[in-house]
Amino acid sequence: MIFRMRVIMPVAVAASALATFGLYQAIRHQKAEAAQPKMAFRKVVVAGLLLPAGKKLDASDLRTGDWPETIVPAGCFSDASDLVDRVVRMEIQPGEAVLETKLAPTGSEGGFSSIIPPGMRALTVSVNTSSGVSGFILPDARVDVLVTVSAPARKEESSTKIILEDIKVLAVDQTFERKEDDPVIVQTVTLLVTPDDAEKLVLASTEGKLQLSLRNNSDRSSRSTAGVKLRELIAKSGTQTSAGSTPRRSSPKESVRPQVVEVIRSAKREEVTFESSGDRSTE
């Protein structure tokens, strides 16, 4: 009996100590949790699938999730029913919060016209498909518009000028094959322009050939250029000489041969002949 008591007593004391320590740790943990502020969550409506521009929303396109209050973006929605029949103005990725800034005004009808902001116009133009960068011009890209105008009577007066800068592309006539990373051949491009720019674009497309220059989407700078004429290109290339060399002057008795310059526009090849005076030319 005495032997049992000697064994039981230490075990009981150890068990009591462990229980006391466990209770102490639990109370300490509860106090630590109570001292820390609890993270607040908020219901946010997100896209359940890819929502393209111009789509009219219904309940099946949306889902609701709990987002930490600290990262909830401004302009979001907490009730999916508030978004039924609203029209998407900018493409929304799956899982992305649906924001007011990416939706057309309330009451807009679905379709392409709903993505055009008030006061702006969408204009479709044909562009030069021989440009290497044209196949990589996609919706939402930013471009400059150049026009080349030919002068039939005086070829050397043909010119190229940037007429519009930092223009947003709304749509192209073909899609981009990202799987194989191959460019498409753009034949028509729809641009978002002001009414004044629309007039310039129509006139330019009627009188000359349009070509697009792709910009960095973060580049909003503007640069005014004077344009360039064919005679200026020829004059600059003709005045270039080797470093340290002295141009040879022709003797008055020497006959000066006319200069013939080959000009290639798209797939058409022409020859322009310049007389010694540089003021007249014939084809």
Image (spheres, rainbow, N blue to C red):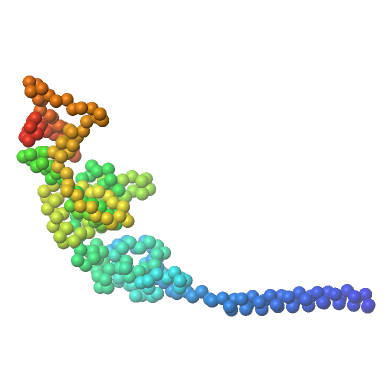
Image coordinates for residue 86, horizontal then vertical, percent: 30, 70
Q: Is residue 39 above or below residue 188?
A: below
Pick whichever, 44 or 18, lies toward us. 18
Taking the spot 11% from the left edge, 48% from the top edge, the residue there is 207
Q: Is residue 134 above or below residue 89?
A: above
Residue 66 in sight: no
Q: Examine the image and state in which quarter residue 236 appears.
A: top left
- The number of numbered discs placed on residues in the rendered structure image is 0
Taking the spot 49% from the left edge, 75% from the top edge, the residue there is 40
Q: Examine the image and state in which quarter residue 142 appears.
A: bottom left
Looking at this rendering, what residue extends furthest in the top direction?
A: 253
Pick whichever, 45 or 73, lies toward us. 73
Taking the spot 13% from the left edge, 34% from the top edge, the residue there is 270
Q: Examine the image and state in which quarter residue 117 appears.
A: bottom left
Left or right: residue 21 compared with residue 3 = left
Pick whichever, 247 or 121, lies toward us. 247
Image coordinates for residue 249, horizontal then vertical, percent: 14, 25
Image coordinates for residue 42, horizontal then vertical, percent: 45, 74
Left or right: residue 41 compared with residue 158 = right
